[in-house]
Amino acid sequence: MMSNWTYIVLLGAVVAVASLFLPRKQQGREAKDTRNMEIALEQFMENTELDHQELVKLVSALREEGKQQTEAGKQRLAELENKCLLLEQQLAFFQQQRQNDLLMAAQTKADTGTAKTAPLAEELPPVVQENEQPASGIQLRYPDLFDLYNQGKSIEAIAKKLGMNKGEVQLILQLAKQEEKAYV
């Protein structure tokens, strides 16, 4: 029979051999878990990079679209300004032509001897004194408003008297000032 000491030595040897195998299994699991985590992290980084590239492309496309819209708006504004200038020139031409026609009609009537001075004065446009500014188009449309304003009435009083909004009265007065500046 084997002695107690032999059993203890054999048991120690079995434990030593078992202890050598156990850590290797745990190290293998840790390495496998680490590798899985590395793979997942790499996948996440690749997905993040792709999302970033898509976002950069989208921002670039939006920026380019914004530039195109701005350029189109500038071009449209330039076209409208040109049309406005052309219409202003046509208006001035037609006003001058109308005034010339009225003068010619008055001269024709005066030459034939059938014209009187009173009707002649009614047909001609109002004469502007040197110190007096010509009545602008907006002043001709709102004579009551400008009469009250020239009398020193406040905007509120004018609005109340004429049944208009204060903002409307202010706008009309500002437009008249702009017309005066344009003619000066």
Image: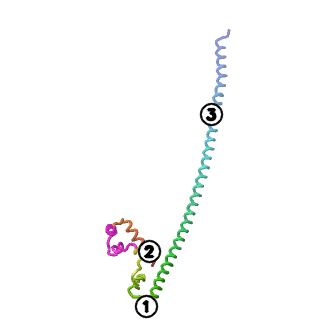
Q: Position of residue 111 (x, y in %)?
A: 45, 91
Give the amino acid type for the residue marked by disc 3 in the picture.
Answer: Asp
Q: Name the residue under label 3.
A: 33
162 left or right, relative to 86: left
Q: Which secondary structure lies at badge 3?
A: helix
Residue beneath disc 1: 113
Tell whether label 1 touches label 2 (CB within 8 Å): no
Q: Which residue is drawn at 53% across and 68% down?
A: 80
Q: Earlier in the sequence, mark 3 or mark 2?
A: 3
Which element carries disc 2, helix, strand or loop? Answer: helix
Mark-to-mark CA distance, 1 and 3: 118 Å
Where residue 119 sits: x, y (%)? 39, 85
Give the amino acid type for the residue marked by disc 1 in the picture. Answer: Gly
Type of amino acid under label 2: Glu
Does label 2 or label 1 sit earlier along the sequence?
1
Q: Mark 2 points at which residue?
A: 179
Tag nearer the camera, 2 or 1: 1
Residue in the picture at 60% in, 45% down:
48
Q: Does the magenta stretch include residue 146?
A: yes
Range covered by the magenta-colored residues: 141-162
Quarter of the figure with the N terminus: top right
